Amino acid sequence: MAKSPQKSSAPASGNAVTADLVAVLVAVTDGTPKIMTIAGGSALPSGPFEFTHRSLQTALRAWVEAQTGHPLGYVEQLYTFADRGRSGDAKSPHSVSISYLGLTREDRVGEGFEAHWSGWYDYFPWEDHRAGAPACLAKIIAPKLKAWAKAAPSPTLQRERWQRCAITFGLDDRDWNEELVLQRYELLWEASLIPEANHSRGREASVVPGKPMTADHRRILATGIARLRAKIKYRPVVFELMPAEFTLLQLQRSVEALAGRLVHKQNFRRLIEQQELVEETGAMAADTVGRPAKLFRFRHAVLAERAVAGTKLPLSRT
Amino acid sequence: MAKSPQKSSAPASGNAVTADLVAVLVAVTDGTPKIMTIAGGSALPSGPFEFTHRSLQTALRAWVEAQTGHPLGYVEQLYTFADRGRSGDAKSPHSVSISYLGLTREDRVGEGFEAHWSGWYDYFPWEDHRAGAPACLAKIIAPKLKAWAKAAPSPTLQRERWQRCAITFGLDDRDWNEELVLQRYELLWEASLIPEANHSRGREASVVPGKPMTADHRRILATGIARLRAKIKYRPVVFELMPAEFTLLQLQRSVEALAGRLVHKQNFRRLIEQQELVEETGAMAADTVGRPAKLFRFRHAVLAERAVAGTKLPLSRT
DNA sequence: CATCTTATGCTCACGGAGAGTATAAATGGC
DNA sequence: GCCATTTATACTCTCCGTGAGCATAAGATG
């Protein structure tokens, strides 16, 4: 950054950069959260921004619709990265990457495209706590983090490092906080446990499970997951990921899939119904085991009725 | 946006844009929230991004420190705008504006700079509800919005418009939601009550009180205020705006200044103290009326101790 | 019919949040 | 010195949201 416009109206050409879009496109199928990927699952869909569109959002929507044949339900900007190190080559034109989070219902990808859907826990196995804390946490991650903490120069720093690890990963009997996705990824990066980190070259063995991605795409994905996990608690965005009609259990499973943790069934239903977020369709679910469930649909009216349209979910502490 | 990198690696020069930074720099003095402005208060500080810095944040920090002589406490990215209409001229190089929110303690500006501080309620007089709903809301804004709603083509649309207005501005006995700063601004824009809106040219009279700004700077400011009002409720960021030592009342006044509404004093203190966010310095406040208050300082340790470091504030409903 | 599975209704206890009351400690005016 | 005023600070009380568990209903399957 420089000075105020009056002081330095540097010629625009002097600061020319390229603008890229990177998208975290989420869908949930059968209780599995998925993201759209390209290049065999090693990258998020991305490309240069074309200024033929009125805005970034419009551009993203058009692109996704062209790719999947389905409109993008909900779009939200995530973050803009412009670090110098991004392009690698210092001489190459600098690039600004603007990342977006998009939610969609269908997971079918249009023909002729190499995009497909990957489960997001493939990239973050330690984030799925639906069946309790994953084994890799206690068996691999915690020990490696402990070793990293021990490697700090002074006892004080060692303690501080471990405290950070324990808080961020819910170790030492602390509560697991599902929203700290990005913090956890960055901590692992700092501890050289992420293959994408340059400084882990040469000791690839000391790395944590989870599929890596090109450049900083996994970090962007972590940002998207964190944002979405936070958002579902106070905005009715889960419904963007649901089919038109669904049972309350399906809805609950989707929430649990995103949050990576289970919720109390009765309380979940109580909250959903008392907020009048859904209405019965009258039909019942077919092809089910157990007592058949009523089908519901999202009451789109709530978006107009309420300002904040809170979707309170029983995800506070548990 | 285009296709995946593999499909179209368009030459970077074809998508060259310029990158600008825009900053919403906030300070609170004597219960008045202020923002740094230039050009006589009609613009936010902004300028081209220089890639000599490692990252956008670094660049912004360096710039602010150079301007004010004081380090920037807290920095957070707000939003990136890249709408085509922004630069006006379709032929000119497109510009991507990356906006930041920054919190600082001191409001002294370095010499030789034209930046100074303006009260943020000068730009949004309808946002200050500390002394009850401002007069301009009932006297000017509500009637104009009502007229705009009435101007909708169908009765249904008229009702929908008014419902949006009532929800967003807390009319018709609805609760005021202080976080909807951006929604309110955008609604006023849509209703052609904002002078910055192009379509209000020629009928400048039908406009709502509040100082306008260059381009979309007032929208960016609204985004920043909204973000900050949301943030103070769950992160201890207020302390970035406080002097090293302060009384609990001063802290409360700062929160109220930002939120634009009053809080219950006893409950405020209970929350602050039970969260162990502050510690006594041992000294008492001097130069005060009434019983002298203890001085407190922020317990920086909380940032390390807790992951989310919640600053719960009594700002839920009231 | 017994059992399994899921749906759905109801209750209960705890704790947090909003709001009010009461008292303490300083200042300034008379 | 007394009183009004202002601010600080300690308690209390009630309501309700939330977590958690119990109980029952309604299907399928053997």
Image (cartoon, coloured by chain):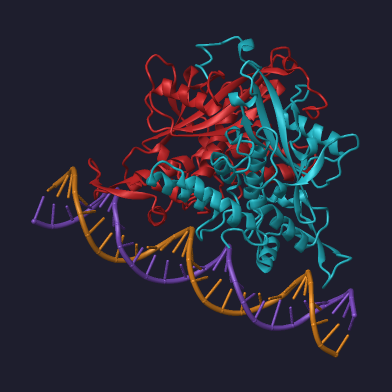
Chain colours: A cyan, B red, C orange, D purple
Q: Quadrant of residue B30?
A: top left
Horizontal side of B54 relative to B93 (left or right) equals left
**Location of residue B20 with respect to A199 vertically, above or below:** above
Horizontal side of A102 relative to B165 (left or right) equals right
Q: Position of residue B257 (x, y in %)?
A: 44, 40
**Location of residue D27 with respect to B152 vertically, above or below:** below
Q: Residue furthest top?
A: A11
Q: Residue at x 60, y 38 (%)?
A: A203
Q: Residue at x 38, y 44 (%)?
A: B251
Horizontal side of B34 relative to A204 (left or right) equals left
Horizontal side of B318 relative to A112 (left or right) equals left
* Residue B209 shows up from this direction: no
Rendered-image quadrant of the C terminus of chain A: bottom right
Q: Position of residue A4 (x, y in %)?
A: 50, 16
* Residue B7 shows up from this direction: yes
Asked whether B136 or A202 is in front, the reply is: A202
Q: Quadrant of residue A85?
A: top right
Q: Residue at x 65, y 24 (%)?
A: A87
Asked whether B292 or A198 is in front, the reply is: A198
